[in-house]
């Protein structure tokens, strides 16, 4: 639009120049008339210069906007793979998990091997620990990924002093109030796994009452762990349904 207007102004300026030259000739170059004509031409030239400067500024703004658009599109292309990175493979290829396949539990970095499938539940061996998990929470990985994420096995020697040290540092209570569901589940799983390793029988999880989502999620997980002997609400006076007590068979 600015270019079109500038072109129109330039065309009008040319016509005005021609009229002015004609008037100067017809007035036989009268000083006063010539002076007014020159002044009019100068004003028109100034107006044209201002319009051309405005066009230059507009073009610079357009160039900056286009450059910004390119950066946004480039950033979008880079971030898209990350957005789908954690979609479980089962949801992509719909191929059922089978015994012997390697998997990672969603929300965890631990890799394990499927040793049994029963309906929607799977038993997975994470090192020396065997636990049950919902198939929908497992992400299939390749053998190469499994080897990469699994540390090199050391000699199978259990040192009593190391177990005692871990027991001393172990905290059997955990507060997951305000956590996201996946984060809360990961924390509880880590707590249960560590308790099984060091043979600590009693755990306490503070999840709060709220709408009961965390409580339900945690208990669904506990029902899949073979070594969980029992779980129940805390006594009413001590927190009731806002706390889950766990008894492990270790």
Image (tube, rainbow, N blue to C red):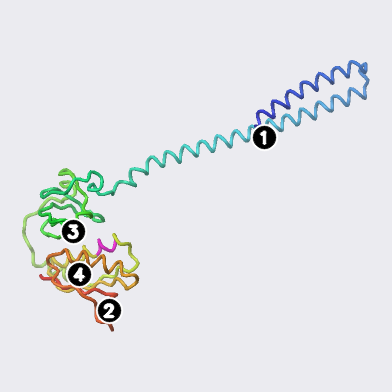
Tell me the distance, in whole angstroms, between the alpha carbons under discs 4 and 2.
24 Å
Q: In this orientation, which residue lies closer to the viewer: 231 or 13?
A: 231
Q: In this orientation, which residue lies closer to the viewer: 119 or 67?
A: 119
In the rendered image of this protein, does residue 21 appear above or below residue 137?
above
Q: Which mark is residue 170?
A: 4
The single residue placed furthest to the front in the displayed view is: 119
Q: Which residues are magenta?
A: 183-187
- Of the numbered discs 4 and 2, the one sitting upstream in the chain is 4
Residue highlighted by disc 1 = 54
Which quarter of the figure has residue 95?
A: top left
Other-residue count near label 4 (Cα within 10 Å), few / some / many at <14 / 14–19 / ≥20: some
- Of the numbered discs 3 and 1, the one sitting upstream in the chain is 1
Residue highlighted by disc 3 = 133
Percent from the top left, x then y, of residue 108?
23, 56
Q: Nearer the viewer, mark 1 or mark 4?
A: 1
Percent from the top left, x then y, of residue 221?
21, 64
In the rendered image of this protein, does residue 130 appear above or below residue 247?
above
Residue highlighted by disc 2 = 240
- The kind of secondary structure element at disc 4 is loop
Which quarter of the figure has residue 60?
A: top right
Residue in the picture at 15% in, 53% down: 112
Magenta stretch contains residue 186: yes
Magenta stretch contains residue 166: no
- The kind of secondary structure element at disc 1 is helix
- Of the numbered discs 2 and 3, the one sitting upstream in the chain is 3
* Total numbered labels placed on residues in the image: 4
- Of the numbered discs 1 and 4, the one sitting upstream in the chain is 1
Tell me the distance, in whole angstroms, between the alpha carbons under discs 3 and 1.
67 Å
- Label 3 with label 1: CB-CB less than 8 Å: no
Q: In this orientation, which residue lies closer to the viewer: 28 or 237?
A: 237
């Amino acid at each position: 639009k600015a270019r079109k207007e500038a072109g129109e102004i330039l065309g009008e300026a040319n016509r005005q120049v021609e009229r002015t030259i004609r008037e100067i000739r017809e007035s036989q170059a009268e000083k006063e008339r010539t002076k007014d004509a020159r002044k009019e031409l100068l004003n028109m030239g100034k107006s044209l210069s201002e319009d051309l400067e405005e066009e230059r500024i507009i073009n610079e703004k357009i160039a900056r906007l286009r450059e910004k658009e390119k950066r946004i599109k480039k950033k979008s292309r880079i971030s898209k793979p990350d957005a789908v990175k954690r979609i479980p493979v089962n949801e992509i290829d719909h191929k059922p998990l089978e015994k012997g396949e390697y998997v990672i539990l969603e929300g965890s970095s631990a890799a394990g091997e499927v040793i049994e499938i029963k309906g929607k539940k799977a038993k997975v061996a994470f090192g020396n620990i065997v636990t049950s998990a919902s198939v929908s929470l497992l992400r299939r990985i390749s053998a190469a990924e499994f080897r990469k994420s699994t540390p090199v096995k050391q000699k199978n020697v259990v040192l009593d002093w190391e177990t005692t040290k871990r027991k001393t540092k172990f905290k059997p209570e955990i507060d997951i109030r305000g956590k996201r569901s996946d984060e809360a589940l990961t924390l509880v799983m880590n707590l249960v796994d560590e308790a099984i390793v060091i043979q600590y029988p009693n755990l306490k999880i503070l999840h709060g009452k709220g709408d009961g989502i965390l409580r339900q999620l945690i208990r669904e997980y506990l029902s899949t762990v073979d070594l969980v002997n029992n779980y129940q609400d805390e006594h009413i006076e001590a927190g009731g349904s806002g706390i889950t007590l766990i008894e492990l068979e270790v």
